[in-house]
Structures are given as structure tokens and as C-alpha cells.
Image: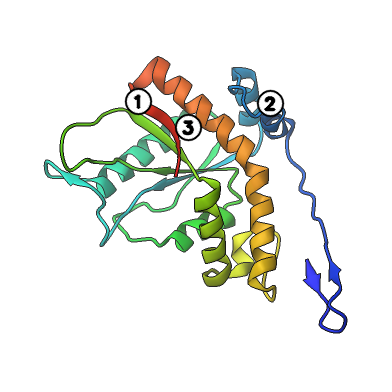
Amino acid sequence: MSISPQDNSASLSIYLKSISEGIFNLTDKPNKDLSSNKISAIANNDFVVVLDPGHGGRDPGAEAGGYRESSLMLELAEAVKESLIRNTDFKVVLTRTEDKFLSLEDRITIASQSDANLFISLHADAVIEGEASGTTVYLLSDKATDKMSAQLASRHDRSEILRGVDLSGLDSQVASVLLDMARQETKPRSEAVASFILKVFKEKITELSSQPLRYA
């Protein structure tokens, strides 16, 4: 989207990107769990998963019993990557492969440059008092995402925020609108993937928290 400095007229250009049938089908019924057939359809295409081990470097995350969240999540990311490569045709990228600090912008840039179809950030939370256990999947709420969009539009290299769309030179309001459009496009797929992950965890891996799907 561009605005003419002469008469303030606006011009909107829409870029369409070719995607596989499997990825397209993720949005046909946003509230329905992903089927194994859909997963197979995706796996047979060039599907890029970016795994983001939380924290790192000077930011160790939660610490308990001599363990650091940053180290545990790196080990988990490496194990998940190995499993995905062994069992699917996915291309898997890690945002970090060592105990290194990465900013939010660094992580987004890696995902963007990798043409990621799916971005998953891995964390191990802790409580100060009492006990807690179980798995939770977080999706960004509209409020949180609106704030993040504004921060990205003002702080991040705009040529890297949206893959294939150069936001350089656009004012923050226009950039935020484009970011919001991108968010609305991916939201149904994020919810579908989250539901599928929780279903598999509940059936085969571990217990879920009392509120397993949350918006933050």
C-alpha cells in the first residue's frame, strides 16, 4: 500500500502466493481438528517448521533444581527436529543451536528468511509457590498482537517483517494494518494446529494443564 505525497491518494497492491492444497485446507474449517490426511498432505510438500527454543544466553528463563529453561528447551527443540526429520518430509529450522541470546526481532527474521509455514516457540514455565504441571499452548490475543504489531512496525527492519512485502517507507499506521491483515490470515491455521497438538499430547504424551489453550 502506498500513499501519493501529491494528492494523498492511496494505492493498494495485493500479492498472491501459491500454496499447496494441504496448507490451504487448514483454513476450510478453523475450529475442526486437523486430520491425519491433512497432515499427510502437508508433509508431502515443502513445509517449513521453525522451532524456537525460548530464552538463551544472558536470559536463562526459569531455573529450578539446577536446570535452566534455556538449556532444556534447546534439548527439546533438537529432539523434536530429529523426530520431524525422521518421520516427515518437513524442513526444520532452529532459531538457535547454542546457548545464545536472541531478541524477538532476531527470531522473527530467522522465521521470515526461512519462509516458515509454522513457527513454534518452546518454553518451560515455573511457579514461585506451590506446584503446577501440564502442557499449555499459547496463541496471541488480539490485544497482545496489536501491541506487538505496533512495536514491530516502529522497531523492526520493515523489509523483513512480511516475507515478500517491503514495508520500508510506509508510515506506522499503514504498516500496522498490513501486519494485522497477515495476522488475521494465519489465525485460523494457528488455532487448528494448536488444537491438533493438544489432542496428540492428551492422547499419547502427557497431561494437559487445567486450561490448555490460552491467549496471551
Find residue 117 and report its horizontal and vertical position in percent: 60, 43
The foreground one among 214 and 169 is 214
Q: Which residue is mark 1?
A: 210
Looking at the rendered image, the disc whose residue lies closer to the viewer, 3 or 2, is 2
The foreground one among 149 and 78 is 149
Count of all numbered marks drawn on residues in the image? 3
- What residue is drawn where x is 25% and y is 62%? 58
- Sequence-wise, which precedes: disc 2 or disc 1? 2
Q: Which residue is mark 2?
A: 29
The quarter of the image holding the C terminus is: top left
| Residue 215 vertical position relative to residue 57 in the rendered view, above or below | above
Q: Is residue 104 visible?
A: yes
Looking at the rendered image, the disc whose residue lies closer to the viewer, 2 or 1, is 1
* Disc 3 to disc 1, C-alpha distance: 28 Å
Left or right: 138 as drawn, with respect to 173: left
> Residue 79, located in which quarter of the rendered image?
top left
